[in-house]
Image (cartoon, grey):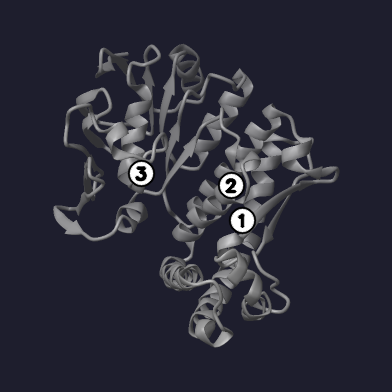
Amino acid sequence: MHITRLHIERVRNLKTVALYGLQPFNVFYGQNGSGKTSVLEAIHLLASGRSFRTHLPKNYIQYGAQDAIVFAQSETEKIGMQKMASGEQLIKVNGDPVATQGQLAKLLPLQLIDPQSTDIIDHGAKPRRQLLDWLMFHVEPEFYHTWQYYARALKQRNSLLKSKRFLSLSELEPWNLMLSEYGEILHAQRVTIVEQWKGFFQEDLRQLLPDLEIRLEYSPGFHSETGLLNDLTHYHEKDCERRYTEYGPHRADLRLKTPLGEADVILSRGQKKLLMMALKLSQIAMLHASNKETVVLLDDVTAELDLTAQQRLIERLSQLGSQVFITTLDHESVQKHLHDLSISYQLFRVENDTVEVVVR
């Protein structure tokens, strides 16, 4: 869904914000600390159930308030969330309560592109695995339920491993069988999607880093040639010593390799930022090819990207049909890009905890 109306209450310093007539591109400018990023944070909260700045609701709920509310409307859908300081939440779609965040996430596929962050490349397997699973969730219909079954089995197996120092193989057998069954399904799903993703990735890589050769490789988290069940039984004693499950899709990774070695070691900071953008843009392109529209949050887009990179990024997102929310200190540069590319946009000034439309 593309958002036409956005309502925010009590998210950080934003007491009440009501935005109407939102465009394909929406630009928020103002001084540091004015609340620009809080607008993006609110949209992220609605789509994912969590902030990209903190894990604790009390940190983004306005000081002294008990809750925060975010509501969005498109031409066909109305979605809303009330997040309590306790961590509890109430979610509604078209006025009806829904049980899971996944229903909002399906309606509002969202990508955060922060040019200053290279966590996906530098900070181990977890952010890369999360990136892959975001794509899986939106393009593989069976992924979410399979992952839920796998996660439950993994939780039970790990609870047993922590419950006492040594467990016999027979005590773990029911969970080994369940974990291996759903783990193999997850693995097969990921292999299929990654193979499709590679083509989209190489296309965006050529646009952003034309002089670099980078391969995207999937590492399953277990020895796929012999199967997950074999790992669970063969490494049984080591799991008992560690008291957690070492092998499985929960340990999967995406490897980014150059001819000279791993990308996190070889590439410069600037190249890593462009690589991160290529990964996310290629996912958006893959959804676009499946007729799914993506909402994209660009935080502080002009901070570290040069003018050419800024224009390439904006042009590509426009080509992919994304609705984009941009924060910047330099709105004139962003406006020039949008004008040169003939892209419809709305400008907002964020000042003294308020967001106002700028008439152009």
Judging by the rendered image, the residue that carries numbered circle 2 is 282
- Residue labelled with disc 3: 50
Identify the amino acid type marked 1.
Trp
In the current view of this chain or complex, which residue is farthest to the front? 165
Q: Which mark is residue 18?
A: none
Q: Residue at x 31, y 55 (%)?
A: 101
Q: Which mark, residue 197?
A: 1
| Secondary structure of the residue carrying numbered label 2 | helix
First in residue order: circle 2 vs circle 1: 1
In the picture, the quarter occupied by the C terminus is top left
Callout 2 touching callout 1 (CB < 8 Å): yes
- Residue lying farthest bottom? 170
Instruction: Specify the amino acid type for callout 3.
Output: Arg
**Alpha carbon distance from label 3 to label 1:** 26 Å
Residue shown at 15% from the left, 57% from the top: 96
- Classify residue 40 as left or right of residue 147: left
Instruction: Residue 263 in the image: state x and y as whole percent.
Output: 74, 41
Mark 2 or mark 3: name the one nearer the start of the chain: 3
Picture layout, residue 288 above or below residue 308: below
Task: Decide: is 343 above or below 49.
Answer: above
What residue type is disc 2 on?
Ser
Measured as percent of width and height from the top left, residue 337 is found at: 51, 20
